[in-house]
Amino acid sequence: MHSHKPVLLAMDLEGVLTPEIWIAVAEHTGVEQLRLTTRDVADYDQLMRMRLELLRKHGIGLAQIQAVIARLDPLPGAETFLAWVRSRWPLVIVSDTFYQFAMPLMAKLGHPTLFCHTLEVDPQGWIVGYHLRIPHPKRRTVRAFRELGFLTVAVGDSHNDVAMLAAADVGILFRPAPQVATAHPQLPVVHTYAQAQQLLQQILPCPEAP
């Protein structure tokens, strides 16, 4: 792809660079329904309301979830891949996670810029609600990047990433669930960081980089 525009990458977090936080919480607490993600439930509000009900029902507060997250590491190879991308193009992580969850993982990834959401937590440490940064945040963020004059590439893995991928100049599915890839055959699919790196090199103008 040849363009005079500067390049910007918008990349999902969970499933692309880090493990799924809610799956880790499910494994730690034994609450199997918390394993459901946007790969399984496309309606994000429905999914979050279910999660918050389960947390309260099973007595799981923010501190317990943060303790689980603190033990998580990025996916193997993610740090190297992210460093490679950031040495060439600006990158923003655009995620449906929450700042109260993600900061330990951001530190392990070298503190990339993160756009996500905020939890509402009561004085006792119960998660009682959540606040989206804006409605339809992923799609609108990528659209705004394009309106600012960037040639925008979006990378995601799940149902809730598809609108973002469609809004970008180029959308890429990274290691998606089979049903996601099947439902969106127009999107290129990569299964490894090496494949992602190769595809980005093919489609993007690359500045001089080490």
Image: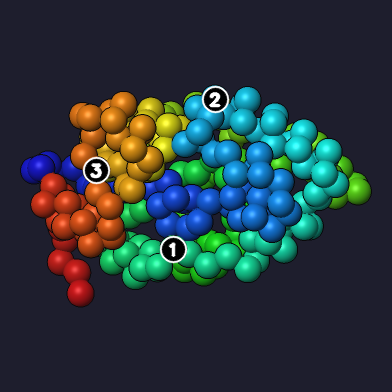
Identify the mark nearer the N-term, 1 or 2. Answer: 2
Kindly identify the amino acid type of the residue bearing the numbered disc 2. Asp
Q: From the viewer's perspective, is 17 left or right of 149?
A: right
Q: 60 and 91: which one is in front?
A: 60
Q: Amino acid at mark 3?
A: Val
SS state under label 2 = loop
Q: Residues within 10 Å of mark 1 (few under 14, many from 20)?
A: some
User: Circle 1 sits in a helix, a strand or a loop, which is it?
Assistant: loop
Q: Is residue 70 placed above or below 182 in the rendered structure?
A: below
Residue 209 place in picture, x, y as percent: 19, 69
Name the residue that disc number 2 marks: 43
Residue 76 in the figure: left or right of residue 95 = left
Estimate the x, y position of residue 99 in percent, counting from the top left. 63, 50
Q: For the view shown, which residue lies furthest in the bottom direction?
A: 210
Residue 82's spot in the image, x, y percent?
35, 63
The image position of residue 139, as x and y in percent, is 41, 30
Look at the numbered discs 3 and 1 and tell me whether their residues touch, using CB distance below 8 Å.
no
- The residue carrying mark 1 is 75
Q: Earlier in the sequence, mark 3 or mark 2?
A: 2
**Residue that label 3 marks:** 189
Q: Furthest-right residue in view? A: 124
Q: Amino acid at mark 1?
A: Leu
> Can you say which quadrant of the picture contains the C terminus?
bottom left
| Relative side of 97 to 51, left or right | left
Q: Earlier in the sequence, mark 3 or mark 1?
A: 1
Find the distance from the CA under tag 1 to the CA under tag 2: 26 Å
Is residue 117 shown left or right of residue 113?
right
C-alpha separation, residue under disc 3 versus residue under disc 2? 23 Å
- Provide the secondary structure element on which disc 3 rests: strand
Of residues 7 and 63, the one drawn nearer to the viewer in this rendering: 63
Identify the residue at image location x=36%, y=32%: 179
**Quick check: 78 above or below 158?**
below
